[in-house]
Image (spheres, helix red, strand yellow):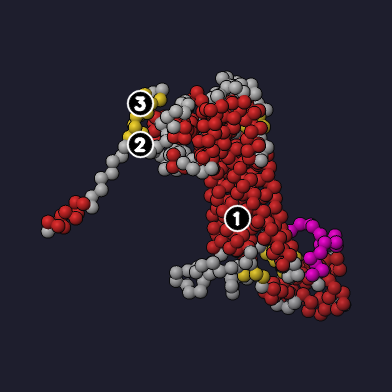
């Protein structure tokens, strides 16, 4: 009994949370000894225990790139000593490379300017620089050195543009290109399969499955083009405007130099805002980007919905496509397989529509010299890009690449369709052709039977007119275009 009590006592581990005292302009704060942030960040952590969601990692990486460029520009302008500039760049580079992510705990729902996150970055850079330099190194000040020539009011909008442009370029654009490539491959693979078209969810004139997929491929290509336009829109940067756009306390060349350095760093084209007052008081560029992302979400949702409709069945639906089986579809119906990748992408589209609406509302609700919804805007744009990119990539790899066509089913449905009658318009006129279609529907007879019994056309002419493949090529004015 005594031994058991001794064993239990020896298993008790006491955790001592060591604290250090740090201060800002408001006074002293106790901060965990393993935290790189300081007093101002600690205040924000305590003030904003809201969602538990910090700002996206890619936004923090973009903010660190801005700090690197600012240090380099200030050094070149002889505003910052070279040894301090070097330390800022070393510490910020680690952050830009994805290190110290846990050192950015401030909630999305914080001060609307993002000042808490800018201060968080300044404090982490100072503390990490002190670790790098050691006791003999120069002492950095979060405001006077790391934030030199800057304000949260121009830094956070700049980081927003830079980080979102990079996310679009590095994540979403490649995912959409891969989807477009896969859809184009299927368009080629399905080029010889003639099927019935559908408008209003009703039978229409024939086309090839390849032509149908060429439309999806073009949607994906145009989605990629929208992403490129969004990147271009984000090229104007607010840096250099400082508090309200006047550029108070910064060098006249600072903005242009930072933009050039960010362009060099990222390979994207950044430039000084044409008007710094607009660049800080409004976020119309981000609203425009949200619109492009909403359009991308619409395109992906359309493609996903069409593919799951064409694959519906396998016995009681369209069943023209066979979708890859990725997982069991039902806990009660054995053998059921559902179009889960399409369903995933549709849900992504719905989510993105909500996020982009949030960005629109954020842009609308900016007041006077500064929009104060910046953290939420950053979160919504990055979350949209993240989900669209991952959703498109998963849909490509786990659905589109493995799609198969059921050529026999396509032929069966096409041959049963009454809309082949459209090709008789040039020979019989609309009214007579309509009467043939109605009689076929009422009697269950084929269009061919009725035309021949009525003696409306000879067999050779009828064969040429009702050739489904011939109907898939434009040329006859009666078949090219027109209403649905």
Which of disc 1 and disc 2 is earlier in sequence? 2
Count of marks overlaid on the render: 3
Which quadrant would the N terminus be assigned to in this image?
Answer: bottom left
Q: Where is residue 385 in the image (x, y as percent from the top left)?
A: 58, 47
Picture disc at residue 32: 2
Identified at 56% across, 27% down, the residue is 82
Q: Residues within 10 Å of mark 3 (few under 14, many from 20)?
A: few
Q: Give the range drawn in magenta.
A: 469-484
Distance CA(mark 1)–CA(mark 3): 49 Å
Q: Which of marks 1 and 3 is in front?
A: 3
Q: In this view, does 314 lie above or below 154?
A: below
Picture disc at residue 392: 1
Distance CA(mark 2)–CA(mark 1): 41 Å
Q: Nearer the viewer, residue 10 or 423?
A: 10
6 left or right of 251 in image: left
Q: Nearer the viewer, residue 9 or 400?
A: 9
Q: Are marks 2 and 1 in contact (CB under 8 Å)?
A: no
Q: In this view, does 150 lie above or below 331?
A: above
Q: Nearer the viewer, mark 2 or mark 1?
A: 2
């Amino acid at each position: 009994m005594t031994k058991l009590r001794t064993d239990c006592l020896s298993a008790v581990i006491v955790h001592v949370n060591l604290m250090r005292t740090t201060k800002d302009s408001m006074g002293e704060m106790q901060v965990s000894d393993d935290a790189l942030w300081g007093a101002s960040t600690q205040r924000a952590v305590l003030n904003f225990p809201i969602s538990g969601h910090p700002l996206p990692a890619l936004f923090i990486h973009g903010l660190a790139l801005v700090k690197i460029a600012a240090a380099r520009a200030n050094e070149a302008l002889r505003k910052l000593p070279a040894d301090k500039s070097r330390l800022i760049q070393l510490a910020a580079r680690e952050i830009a490379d994805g290190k110290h992510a846990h050192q950015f705990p401030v909630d999305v729902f914080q001060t609307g300017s993002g000042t808490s996150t800018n201060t968080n970055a300044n404090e982490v850079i100072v503390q990490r620089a002190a670790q790098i330099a050691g006791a003999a190194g120069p002492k950095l000040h979060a405001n006077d050195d790391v934030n030199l020539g800057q304000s949260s009011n121009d830094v956070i909008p700049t980081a927003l543009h830079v980080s979102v442009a990079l996310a679009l370029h590095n994540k979403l654009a490649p995912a959409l290109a891969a989807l477009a490539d896969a859809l184009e491959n299927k368009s080629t693979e399905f080029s010889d399969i003639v099927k019935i078209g559908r408008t209003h969810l009703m039978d229409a004139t024939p086309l090839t499955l390849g032509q149908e997929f060429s439309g999806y491929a073009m949607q994906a290509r145009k989605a990629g083009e929208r992403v490129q336009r969004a990147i271009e829109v984000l090229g104007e940067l607010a840096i250099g405007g400082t508090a309200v756009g006047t550029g108070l306390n910064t060098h006249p060349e600072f903005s242009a130099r930072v933009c050039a350095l960010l362009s060099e760093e990222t390979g994207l084209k950044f430039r000084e805002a044409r008007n710094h007052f607009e660049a800080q008081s409004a976020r119309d560029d981000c609203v425009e980007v949200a619109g492009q992302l909403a359009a991308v979400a619409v395109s992906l949702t359309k493609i996903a919905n069409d593919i799951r409709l064409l694959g519906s069945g396998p016995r009681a639906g369209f069943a023209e496509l066979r979708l890859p089986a990725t997982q069991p579809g039902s806990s009660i119906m054995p053998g059921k397989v559902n179009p889960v990748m399409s369903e995933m992408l549709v849900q992504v589209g719905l989510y993105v529509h909500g996020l982009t609406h949030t960005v629109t509302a954020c842009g609308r609700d900016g007041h006077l010299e500064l929009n104060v919804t910046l953290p939420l805007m950053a979160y919504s744009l990055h979350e949209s890009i993240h989900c669209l990119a991952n959703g498109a990539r998963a849909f490509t790899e786990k659905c589109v690449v493995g799609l198969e066509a059921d050529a026999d089913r396509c032929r069966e449905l096409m041959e049963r369709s009454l809309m082949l009658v459209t090709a008789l318009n040039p020979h019989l006129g609309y009214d007579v052709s309509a009467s043939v279609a109605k009689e076929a529907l009422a009697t269950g007879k084929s269009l061919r039977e009725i035309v021949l019994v009525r003696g409306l056309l000879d067999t050779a002419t009828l064969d040429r007119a009702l050739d489904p493949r011939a109907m898939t090529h434009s040329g006859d004015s009666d078949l090219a275009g027109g209403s649905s």
